[in-house]
Image (tube, grey):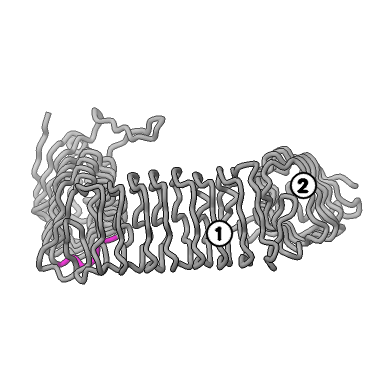
């Protein structure tokens, strides 16, 4: 049953006196004429537009449609917001089907202003609007009608992402900025149009390019063909421009120089990518979640393999890095769990990634030019193939692999364990430092022998070694990270030979000086004359006993 009301407001901020609590919960149509302010918006309209519900077992939102409030139509087209130039932020999970903005609004408010409005179908924006903020109408699956006013200048990132019911978008003549993924997942849009008078953008076959045709800005997710050929002269694939599109193949021109971040993320049908040698940069997350991707040919001109470039590509089994690549960035490949073969070539210098984390990878060869391997810059827990093996070129002057451990060449630092099935582990006698994440997640490890002369145990070095029961720490050790033994749930005893308690390195996070919550029940054995010193500096151990 519909309940309608029109309210005339002479003094902004008085809406609460012109509407009853019962009306706030029962009205289905509300029109306001006159003046409003943010007090009216957030004290009254917010209550009328916010609905509550729950998530089911699959985290789908369930809204209680038979419970108040019931507002469906909110018409603010004949009122003025007097104390601000922006508007929004109260339509989350609302039952609104139609929303007409105040006539003087310049921008939508903040991030996510009207996102996730499950029933919103029609929006009328004022001619004064200049900016749609990031994610303004994202994930409004029923939104099928919205006007973009002639004065609009900016469309924020993800502004209309996943608005699957939208069929048409025309970019007005004054729009100079279209953000990353502004139309991501708008599968109903087969082509874009741009006002012919727009000096910044142009459409070619329904695809938005910069006016000089050097940059792809936005590709329609519902593009009618499975293949797309980027036009000649294009130099840049813009950030997020192809995100969520349905294409299964694409051709790039020899003029292309840069593929920006997020550009092909969620292209779930994309099968193959051949990147011409003219490309010098492929930025972060460029092909993330391209779940059908099976073949990749990288440019021979790129020097950096960027973060999460192929994350979420389970069908990508093999990849060859060209000799031009100097650096593999954090989680560039380690979350590409389908990889069975990674070919590294000479020229590579730095690996800031835990490549051991690739589940199906059985073997990795490290060329002689690699001078640094920094698995600590990858935050993924290692769940790799237990039979994984690693080989370092015999002429490599920086690194050495020995008995399941990767060391610096002089073995001064133990970098990481790559034999994931090890139950026992002996660290080389020359080792002085056990690096961060050294054997993080080595769930089968039961015992480890640390060498005399060891000085430091790094950040989370033994994190999640869940079967490790006892540990003997040489008297030479003077620094231990406070999370070095986190989640070592089976640790029963720790013997520390140092008369002066080793410093607990906490990076300012652990103000109480406790190793971690999981060693509190571990018995700590220390020199008798040092018990009080350990009680003072290693607080948190319930049992400290003499050696």
Residue 119 lies in quadrant: top left
Q: Which image quadrant is residue 284 in?
A: bottom left
Residue toward you, 506 or 51:
506
Q: Which of 531 and 195 is in front in this view?
A: 195
The residue under the point 51% across, 47% down is 339
Q: Reply yes or no: does residue 176 show up in magenta.
A: yes
134 and 77: which is toward the camera: 134
Residue beneath disc 1: 344
| Residue 412 visible at all | yes
> Which badge, 2 or 1, comes first in the chain's sequence?
1
Numbered disc 2: secondary structure: strand
Q: Name the residue under label 2.
A: 425
Q: Considering only vertical position in the picture, is 87 above or below 547?
A: below
Q: Which of 240 and 14 is in front in this view?
A: 240
Residue numbers of the magenta segment: 174-179
Q: Quick check: can you spot residue 90? A: no
Q: Which residue is drawn at 55% across and 62% down?
A: 345
Relative image position of residue 332 (x, y in whole percent): 50, 56
Side of 450 where 462 appears, left or right: left
Residue drawn at point x = 54 percent, y = 49 percent: 341
Q: Position of residue 36 (x, y in %)?
A: 17, 55
Residue 10 in picture, x, y percent from top left: 10, 55
Q: Is the magenta stretch mostly helix, strand or loop?
A: loop
Q: Is residue 189 left or right of residue 282?
A: left
């Amino acid at each position: 049953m519909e309940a309608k009301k029109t309210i005339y407001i002479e003094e902004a901020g008085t809406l609460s006196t012109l509407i009853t609590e019962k009306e706030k919960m029962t009205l289905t149509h509300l029109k306001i004429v006159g003046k409003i302010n943010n007090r009216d918006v957030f004290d009254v309209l917010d209550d009328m537009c916010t609905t509550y519900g729950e998530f089911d077992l699959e985290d789908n939102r369930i809204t209680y449609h038979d419970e108040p409030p019931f507002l469906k139509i909110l018409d603010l087209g004949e009122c003025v917001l007097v104390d601000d130039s922006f508007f929004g932020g109260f339509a989350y999970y609302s039952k609104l089907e139609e929303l007409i903005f105040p006539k003087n609004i310049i921008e939508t408010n903040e991030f996510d202003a009207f996102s996730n409005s499950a029933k919103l179908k029609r929006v009328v924006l004022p001619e004064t609007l200049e900016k749609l903020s990031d994610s303004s109408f994202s994930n409004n699956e029923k939104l099928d009608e919205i006007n973009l006013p002639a004065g609009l200048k900016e469309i924020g990132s993800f502004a209309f992402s996943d608005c699957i019911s939208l069929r048409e978008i025309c970019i007005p003549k004054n729009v100079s900025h279209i953000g990353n993924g502004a139309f991501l997942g708008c599968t109903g849009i087969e082509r874009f149009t741009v006002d012919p008078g727009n000096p910044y953008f142009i459409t070619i076959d329904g695809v938005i390019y910069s006016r000089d045709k050097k940059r792809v800005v936005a590709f329609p997710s519902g593009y009618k063909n499975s293949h797309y050929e980027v036009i000649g002269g294009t130099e840049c694939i813009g950030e997020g421009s192809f995100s969520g599109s349905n294409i299964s193949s694409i051709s790039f021109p020899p003029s292309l120089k840069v593929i920006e971040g997020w550009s092909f993320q969620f292209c779930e049908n994309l099968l193959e990518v051949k990147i011409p040698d003219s490309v010098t940069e492929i930025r972060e997350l460029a092909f993330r979640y391209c779940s059908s991707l099976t073949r990749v040919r990288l440019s021979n001109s790129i020097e950096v393999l960027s973060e999460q470039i192929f994350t979420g590509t389970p069908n990508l089994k093999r990849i060859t890095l060209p000799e031009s690549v100097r650096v593999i960035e954090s989680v560039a490949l380690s979350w590409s769990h389908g990889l069975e073969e990674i070919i590294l070539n000479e020229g590579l210098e730095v690996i800031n990634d835990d490549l051991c984390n690739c589940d199906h990878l059985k073997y990795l060869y490290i060329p002689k030019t690699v001078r640094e391997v920094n698995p600590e810059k990858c935050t993924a827990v290692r769940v790799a193939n237990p039979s994984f093996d690693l080989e370092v070129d015999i002429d490599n002057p920086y690194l050495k692999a020995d008995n399941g451990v990767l060391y610096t060449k002089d073995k001064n630092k133990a970098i990481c364990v790559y034999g994931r099935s090890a139950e026992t582990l002996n660290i080389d006698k020359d080792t002085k430092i056990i690096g961060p994440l050294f054997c993080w997640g080595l769930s089968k490890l039961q015992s480890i022998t640390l060498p005399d002369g060891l000085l430091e145990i790094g950040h989370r070095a033994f994190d999640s070694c869940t079967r490790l029961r006892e540990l003997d720490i040489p008297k030479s050790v003077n620094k231990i990270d406070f999370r070095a033994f986190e989640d070592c749930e089976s640790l029963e005893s720790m013997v520390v030979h140092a008369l002066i308690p080793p410093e607990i390195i906490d990076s300012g996070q652990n103000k109480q000086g406790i190793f971690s919550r999981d060693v509190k029940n571990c018995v700590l054995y220390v020199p008798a004359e040092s018990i009080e010193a350990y009680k003072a500096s290693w607080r948190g151990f319930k049992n400290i006993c003499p050696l």
